[in-house]
Image (cartoon, rainbow, N blue to C red):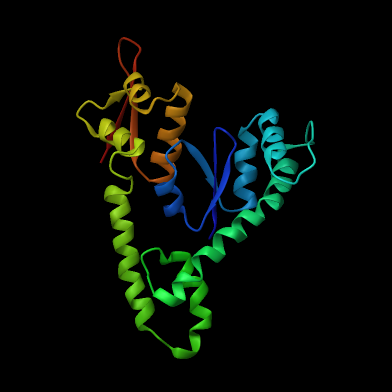
């Protein structure tokens, strides 16, 4: 299923899978793969941001406001479907020719109906282990070595964790970006349990548990 990401600059990008989105995006982002999920995100965004997102999309008529966040989400969702369609064809041609299963989640789903007549059960059997290997690789080292995600995870895995100031210095992001990255990317997207505590001096400390 196509996954869309949107960063603080309101740039929307489409990826074939959530894994590709997490691996390719270095800055904090929100993700969604349905109009419903986009609508949920839109509820938390100020009206000004929804207008800015819409007006930044190609081929639209600029607006000054929307009746509601739901209305904005509906129009934005329809407008970006071209991005999702563009992301899909890129994955389909290589799948049948090369038979590569490394990036195969969505591709395998597209090629399965066409190959139904051949009853090649070996393909699903082979893709399943590789999918598991890919998932394991991403769980253990999804972030690219040296990426900001990898650096931040390393900080949070230290004994005693890391302060918000240390994370900001390492990532070169503002405080709200760091907090959003920790709760959104590390927590929701990567499934990591990040504990947040406040020291006696008032400094916020984050640490990955488990």
- Give residue 48's position: percent from left, percent from top: 69, 28
Q: Return the residue nearer the eye: 56 or 193.
A: 56
Quarter where residue 132 is shown = bottom left
Residue at 32% across, 60% down: 134
Q: How many marks?
A: 0
Q: Residue at x 66, y 51 (%)?
A: 80
Indicate whether 29 appears above or below 137. Answer: above
64 lies left or right of 79: right
Left or right, 97 with respect to 138, comes to right
Identify the residue at image location x=34%, y=15%. Answer: 203
Residue 87, how many percent across, how many down?
55, 59
* Viewer-closest of 193 and 104: 104
Q: Is residue 120 above or below residue 157?
A: below
Image quadrant containing the C terminus: top left
Q: In this image, 182 relative to 80: left or right?
A: left
Rendered view: 180 above or below 100 = above
């Amino acid at each position: 299923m196509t996954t869309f990401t949107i960063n603080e600059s309101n740039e929307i990008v489409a990826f074939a899978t959530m894994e590709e989105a997490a691996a390719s995006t270095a800055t904090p982002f929100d993700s969604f793969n349905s109009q419903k999920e986009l609508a949920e995100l839109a509820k938390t965004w100020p009206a000004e941001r929804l207008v800015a997102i819409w007006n930044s999309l190609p081929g639209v008529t600029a607006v000054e406001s929307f009746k509601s966040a739901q209305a904005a989400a509906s129009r934005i969702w329809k407008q970006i479907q071209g991005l999702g369609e563009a992301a899909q064809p890129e994955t389909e041609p290589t799948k049948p020719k090369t038979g590569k299963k490394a990036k195969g989640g969505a591709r395998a789903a597209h090629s399965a109906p066409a190959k139904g007549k051949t009853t090649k059960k070996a393909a699903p059997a082979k893709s399943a282990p590789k999918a598991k290997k890919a998932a394991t690789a991403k769980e253990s080292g999804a972030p690219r070595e040296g990426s900001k995600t990898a650096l931040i995870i390393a900080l949070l895995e230290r004994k005693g964790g890391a302060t918000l100031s240390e994370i900001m210095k390492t990532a070169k992001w503002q405080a709200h970006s760091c907090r959003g990255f920790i709760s959104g990317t590390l927590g929701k997207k990567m499934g990591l349990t990040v504990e947040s505590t406040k020291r006696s001096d008032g400094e916020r400390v984050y640490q990955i548990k488990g």
